[in-house]
Amino acid sequence: MTRGAPPLLSAAAPALLAVRILAVLVLASVVLRCAGTIVEEPRAALGTPEQIKAALTGDDFRLKNQAREQLGSLPPADQMSLLAELIAEGDAPTRMLAVAELARLPGEASARILADVAASDPDPEVREFASLALQP
């Protein structure tokens, strides 16, 4: 007689992994939002969607954080367009960031983009995060 994990525990493993991933992403979001206050540096000019997109796809952590903050100042249609571009063109971490920001936007358009990411993104973690973002 072999012992395995109880059926309830085995069935819960994917959900626990999803919760852990979500917790890490929430923590990363908090760290990104707080990082700018740790070291005060002059803010970069990020007034246009193109400047924000360039900063979000760049390697500078502080600039990326500033761009994420500035993203909220854009009109919702510009936010949606920029995030859709990041999902289409960005690397996995950038797509993950775009999914997190899309999850904050209300409406059917953001839900459609998230559903598409959940179904077809090449990275399984991005797909899973998009699926979690679609849940009420």
Image (cartoon, rainbow, N blue to C red):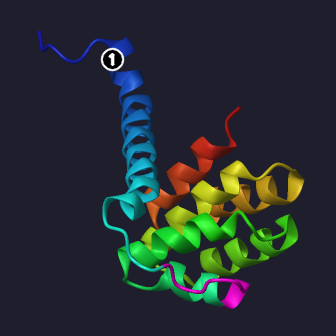
Q: Is residue 111 rendered to the left or right of residue 16?
A: right
Nearer to the camera, 55 or 3: 55
Residue in the picture at 71% in, 74% down: 84
Q: In this view, does 54 lie above or below 66?
A: below
Residue 44 among those drawn in magenta: yes
Q: Quadrant of the C terminus?
A: top right
Residue in the picture at 38% in, 76% down: 41
Residue stretch rendered in magenta on the structure: 43-50
Asked whether residue 85 is in view, the answer is yes
Image coords of residue 53 (percent x, y)? 61, 83
Asked whether residue 122 is in view, the answer is no
User: SS of the residue at dot 1?
Assistant: helix
Q: Name the residue under label 1.
A: 9
Residue 113 among those drawn in magenta: no
What count of labels does the image hold?
1
Nearer to the camera, 81 or 44: 44
Instruction: Find residue 10 and report its image quarter.
Output: top left
Image coords of residue 1 (percent x, y)? 11, 9
Q: How crowded is mark 1: few (under 14 residues within 10 Å), some or many (20 or more)?
A: few
Q: Is residue 27 rendered to the left or right of residue 53?
A: left
Q: In this view, does 115 lie above or below 54?
A: above
Image coords of residue 34 (percent x, y)? 41, 54
Nearer to the camera, 96 or 128: 96
Q: Is residue 52 rendered to the left or right of residue 48?
A: left
Direction left: furthest residue: 1
Q: Magenta stretch mostly in which secondary structure?
A: loop
Residue in the picture at 42% in, 59% down: 32
Residue in the picture at 60% in, 59% down: 99
Image coords of residue 68 (percent x, y)? 57, 67
Amino acid under label 1? Answer: Leu
